[in-house]
Amino acid sequence: MSAETGTLAPVDEQITLKDLHVDPYPIYKRLRAEAPVLRVKAAGRTFLTKAADTKFVKDNPAIFSSNDPNTPMKPAFQAHTLMRKDGAEHLSERMAMAPALLPKTIQEVWQPLYRQYAAEYLDRLPRGEIVDLHKQLSAPIAARILAHILGIPEATDEEMIFWSQALIDGAGNFGWEPGPFAVSDHANLEMNALLGKAVERVRAVPDHSALSVMVNAENPIPMSQIVANIKIAIGGGINEPRDALSTIVFGLLTEPEQLEEVRRTGKWGQAFEEGVRWVAPIQASSRLVTEDVEIRGCHIPRGDTVMTIQASANHDEDLYDHPERYDVFRTRNPHQAFGSGPHHCAGTHVARRTVGAVMTEMLFERFPGMTLPDPSVVQWRGFGFRGPINLPVILN
Amino acid sequence: MKITYITADGTETVVEAREGDSVMQVAIANDIDGIIGECGGSMMCATCHCYVDDAWAEKTGPQNDGESDLLDCAASETKPTSRLSCQIKMRPELDGLVVHLPETQL
């Protein structure tokens, strides 16, 4: 895949962002077969839909930079964040937060706390009637544990969920409409106010939280970046575990034989991995091309923006049989749901050790007779981020 | 040159490697069970943890900068011979290298 004089990638003018938002998988299936490198006009990006190509891009940050100035992320977060930086700068900001996300810390501090909240949140769910598990459990439990991990436990679930959505909507506001930025500005005001107080608290009483580790570090990163990091984690730390949990529960409830086998064998971790492969909570990422490069015979010029579609990579027929099916017992599952390369998801260990190792098992243990009366009413949405938007179950 | 991978259950696989390849890359290219290498060698995921065989530990050398922090993230117990296999690059004197793989990487 070296830079040579190939032809430019073909252009598509048919695919709309709405098509991708509603049901992208049949489109990606066609693209993998017919046009795995494709300039999609509606997105203004070159789509890469094969697993080898998405991985190649993520693993070569010198050619495919995260430092893409043309994104609405900056106004949404009111900062140039580590998500959009490369090299040493990205690394130092990322590592500043890392101690709070180490498996040791997770195992000793966050997992026990998560278990306690999981029990509490399961307690309050009504039995014997339709309950939307996505809104009643997946979202609030994700918000609660994140508030603690970040060091802002005084934020309510509702606040966390609102901020997260406001940041995501702002960051995804590629039409640069004023509305979403007005909402994210408001969220930023609220977060800044709360963070101001939280910083004083962790200075006085240090703990294991991300805020505390960053604030109390020997050589702390600038306060503006500490605040930006916390906001990135709020924006990126609720919808993903929320959507992962709802997706896995949907998968298991619609594949009762697999559920039975998972119960028997305790392969909850595998059920989790398959869920995030099947419908990756983060479906696509952008990278700015810094030098002319060729992928599958298509010339991609410097200055172009490629979009790695990990949703599609995770369904690549080169790697998976029946990729469209939720199948916990696949022999191999080298999915890219957590990305690859220097920006590999920093929340991976937390997700695996909370949603993966605790929640699904607790949920099915608590409600062994849980049913999904009508799977067809579950709606799936999202192009950049994807998951069910409702999950009406009956708990028993 | 060759690398021998020995999984936690004792399965031995000998594969061919080229100079400059990392021990993680060679494992992935040969479908070795027990190495995931999810972040592609960026020292971000700690899913390519291996134990260098005692006979080879001196030749592979010590952990690189930042490697021990990541090894703290490894899912299985770490030992003095623990390395991230993405950080061991093959060179002629490592021909015949033997690495042991942990129980789990996740």
Image (cartoon, coloured by chain):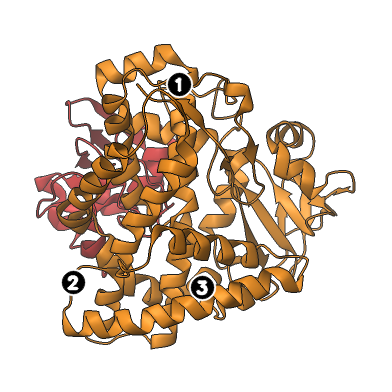
Chain colours: A orange, B red
Give, as a three-letter code, the residue at label 2: Asp
Please name the residue shown 29% across and 35% down the image: B34
Q: Is residue A133 left or right of residue A29?
A: left
Instruction: Say few, some or many: other residues with alpha carbon within 10 Å of mark 2 (under 14 / 14 to 19 / 20 or more).
Output: some
> Which of the two discs, 2 and 1, labels the residue nearer the N terminus?
2
* Residue bearing the label numbered 1: A253
Q: Which disc, if any, is residue A207?
A: 2
Which chain letter goes with mark 2? A
Q: Which disc, if any, is residue A310?
A: none
Q: Is mark 3 on a helix, strand or loop?
A: loop
Q: Are marks 2 and 1 in contact (CB under 8 Å)?
A: no
Marks 3, 1 in one chain: yes
Q: Is residue A344 visible?
A: no
Please name the residue shown 31% across and 43% down the image: A121
* Image quadrant occupied by the C terminus of chain A: top left
Give, as a three-letter code, the residue at label 3: Asp
Q: What element carries label 1?
A: helix
Where is residue A343 drawn, in percent x and y?
Answer: 47, 61
Q: In this view, does A327 lie to the left or right of A383?
A: left
* Residue bearing the label numbered 3: A86
Q: Is residue A223 above or below residue A241?
A: below
Alpha-carbon span between mark 2 and mark 1: 39 Å
